[in-house]
Image: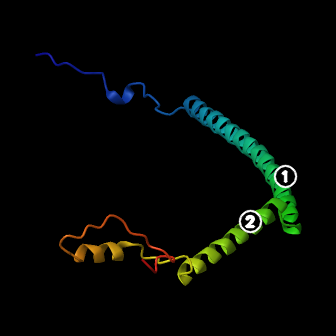
Amino acid sequence: MSQQINLFNPIFRKQEVLLSLQHATAILLTIAVVAGAGSAYRYYQAASLAKETNALAAELASQQTILDEMSARRSTGKSKLLEAEIARIESKTQEDQKILSLLKGGDLGDTKGYSSYMAGFARQITAGVWLTGFDIVGAGRHM
């Protein structure tokens, strides 16, 4: 009878190290490089935004001085063109008020028109009489 002896034991096999010192160093170095690059990029962005902010602040100050000058110029005196336009509108309003009071007063005639005369003639029927014309005088008050 023969018996086989197995000399292969897994304990004696060469063990692989999952994270060696070399691998850990490479990973840490890669992380440091990526973090440094990201930090440098953020620093560059912050610097460019700071420059843009300073430029916009200077532009704002410039525009504010222009606005202050224009406000001071506007408040010191009225525009002559604007004053002339106001005077023209006021005189036109006064003329319109005069015309309105003249029309309401009835000095120019009846504001209802001549339709009441026409309606009166339409109601009158006289056989054998022909109306060939008529005149309304006295600002519409007499016929």
On the rendered image, what quadrant is the N terminus found in?
A: top left
**Residue at screen point 74% across, 65% down:** 88
Specify the farthest residue to the front. Answer: 128
Secondary structure at badge 2 equals: helix
Task: Identify whether 111 is placed above or below 132.
Answer: below
Amino acid at dot 2 = Arg
Left or right? Give the position of 142 relative to 96: left
14 left or right of 56 in image: left
Q: Which amino acid does label 1 sit on?
A: Ser
The answer to which quarter of the image holds residue 76 is: bottom right
Residue name at image x 81 percent, y 58 percent:
67
Of the 4 image quadrants, the one containing the C terminus is bottom left
Q: Residue at x 76, y 47 (%)?
A: 50
Total tally of numbered discs in the picture: 2
Q: What residue is pinned by disc 2?
A: 88
| Residue bearing mark 1 | 62
Q: Check contact, mark 2 vs mark 1: CB within 8 A.
A: no
